[in-house]
Amino acid sequence: MFIMHENDLSYIIRGCIFKVYNATGPGLLESAYEMALAYELRKSGLEVETQVGLPFQYESIQLDLCYRLDILVNKKVIIEIKSVESLTDVHFKQLTTYLKLADKRLGILVNFNTSKIDSSIKRIVNNL
């Protein structure tokens, strides 16, 4: 069985993002992009989970379902989808926090509400 590493997955994910963007363009809701991207990723043979609950440990208690990952690919890569005027620091911090809480090494932040999708795909790493 071939094990795909984060960089291999990132290449496929990026291609699927381009497919979705080229078919839809900007202006849709994040949930529409999430569903379309999950579909394209599955067509590419990847394991895809959407709206994955991410518990948060605070002192001695675990707070379930505080956060939700938009898409988790092959249990390795988190994709955070945005459809906003522009990405801000808080979007990057959100994904960085998700990577740490989920103990994952690679996250992809994508803003579909853009005229240039290639510059709106950002890789965020956590000890990669």
Image (cartoon, rainbow, N blue to C red):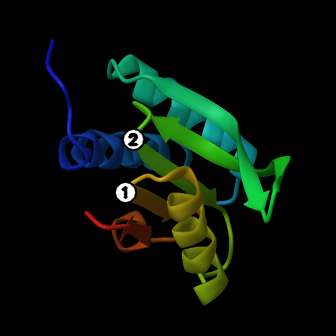
- The image quadrant where one finds the N terminus is top left
Task: Give 70 or 20, whichever is nearer the viewer.
Answer: 70
Q: Tell me which corner region of the image, top left, top right, bottom left or bottom right, holds residue 106.
A: bottom left
- Whether 90 is drawn above or below 55: the answer is below
Task: Give 62 or 22, whichever is nearer the viewer.
Answer: 62
Residue 105 % position (x, y): 36, 56
Give the residue pinned by disc 1.
106
Give the residue pinned by disc 2.
76
Residue at the far top in the pictured view: 1
Residue at the far bottom in the pictured view: 89
Left or right: where 66 falls relative to 111: right
Residue at 61% over, 81% down: 86
Residue 69 % position (x, y): 65, 47
Is residue 111 in view?
Answer: no
Left or right: where 93 falls relative to 77: right
Q: Residues within 10 Å of mark 2 (few under 14, many from 20)?
A: some
Task: Give 116 or 57, whichever is nearer the viewer.
Answer: 57
Residue at the far left in the pictured view: 2
Task: Give the mark, 1 or 2, whose residue is nearer the N terminus.
Answer: 2
Residue at 56% over, 66% down: 95
Name the amino acid type tagged 2.
Lys
Q: Find out whether the residues at labels 1 and 2 contact each other: C-beta distance under 8 Å.
A: yes
Q: Tell me which corner region of the image, top left, top right, bottom left or bottom right, holds residue 116.
A: bottom left
Q: Tell me which corner region of the image, top left, top right, bottom left or bottom right, holds residue 92.
A: bottom right
Q: CA distance from mark 1 to mark 2?
A: 7 Å
Task: Give 55 or 125, whichever is nearer the viewer.
Answer: 55
Name the amino acid type tagged 1.
Leu
- The image quadrant where one finds the C terminus is bottom left
